[in-house]
Image (tube, rainbow, N blue to C red):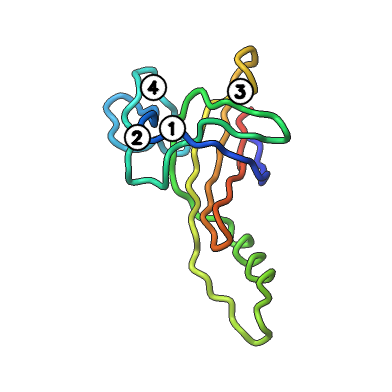
Amino acid sequence: MRRFSDSVQVRLQERQRCRVAQPAGSAGAVAPGGSAASGGAEPFEGGVAGPPPEAFIWRGRLYVVRQVLGQWRERRAWWHDALEADEEQVRPGETLVAAAREQHVWRVEASPGWSFAPGVYDLAHDESPRGDRWSLVRVAD
């Protein structure tokens, strides 16, 4: 698994078409180490932060999502919050106290075209005060 922190542009699915692959007999989201079963998909659960990605642009190339393998929330790296606070120019003597923010991660199977073999990508959605940001955080080799 290679790690990245590359910004990506993401197109989201429409609510009516949202489906997330679930292991047979499972009622929740697939955990980070889990895998999708071949037994169909369950309807999208409304308790998560929006619809899943349908496609994304990474390094100038369009990747089409073939299947959503899982989703979860994880804490955002603390240094991102510190860097953003530094950019907002915290005054000397002030203490930076920020609540740890979370990001929503979607593990997807995607490819840059139907003739290419699909890969597994983790896309993170971060809702910061500056706006919504998407980034590619991991790629499975």
Residue drawn at x 50%, y 51% as measured from the top left:
103
Bin the neighbour count of mark 3 within 10 Å (Cα to Cα): few under 14, some 14-19, many 20 and up. many
On screen, residue 20 above or below 81: above
Instruction: Please tell me whether mark 4 sits on a helix, a strand or a loop.
Output: loop
Marks 3/2: CA–CA distance: 22 Å
> The residue under label 1 is which amino acid type?
Gly
Instruction: Please tell me whether mark 1 sits on a helix, a strand or a loop.
Output: loop
> The residue under label 3 is which amino acid type?
Ser
Q: Is residue 45 left or right of residue 107?
A: left
Q: Are marks 2 and 1 in contact (CB under 8 Å)?
A: no
Q: Say which label, 3 or 4, has the lower sequence index.
A: 4
Single out the mark in the foreground, 2 or 1.
Answer: 2
Find residue 24 and report its image quarter. Answer: top left
Q: Say which label, 2 or 1, has the lower sequence index.
A: 1
Bin the neighbour count of mark 4 within 10 Å (Cα to Cα): few under 14, some 14-19, many 20 and up. few
Per the rendering, the mark at residue 111 is: 3
Marks 1/4: CA–CA distance: 9 Å
Per the rendering, the mark at residue 34 is: 1
Marks 2/1: CA–CA distance: 17 Å
Q: Which residue is mark 4?
A: 37
Q: Say which label, 1 or 3, has the lower sequence index.
A: 1
Q: Which residue lies most toward the top here? A: 115
Instruction: Please tell me whether mark 2 sits on a helix, a strand or a loop.
Output: loop
Tell me where residue 65 appears, x and y as whole percent.
Answer: 53, 27
Marks 3/4: CA–CA distance: 19 Å
> The residue under label 2 is which amino acid type?
Phe
Q: Which residue is mark 2?
A: 44
Instruction: Please tell me whether mark 3 sits on a helix, a strand or a loop.
Output: strand
Q: Are marks 3 and 2 in contact (CB under 8 Å)?
A: no
Closest to the observer: 51 or 79? 51
Residue drawn at x 69%, y 69% as measured from the top left:
87
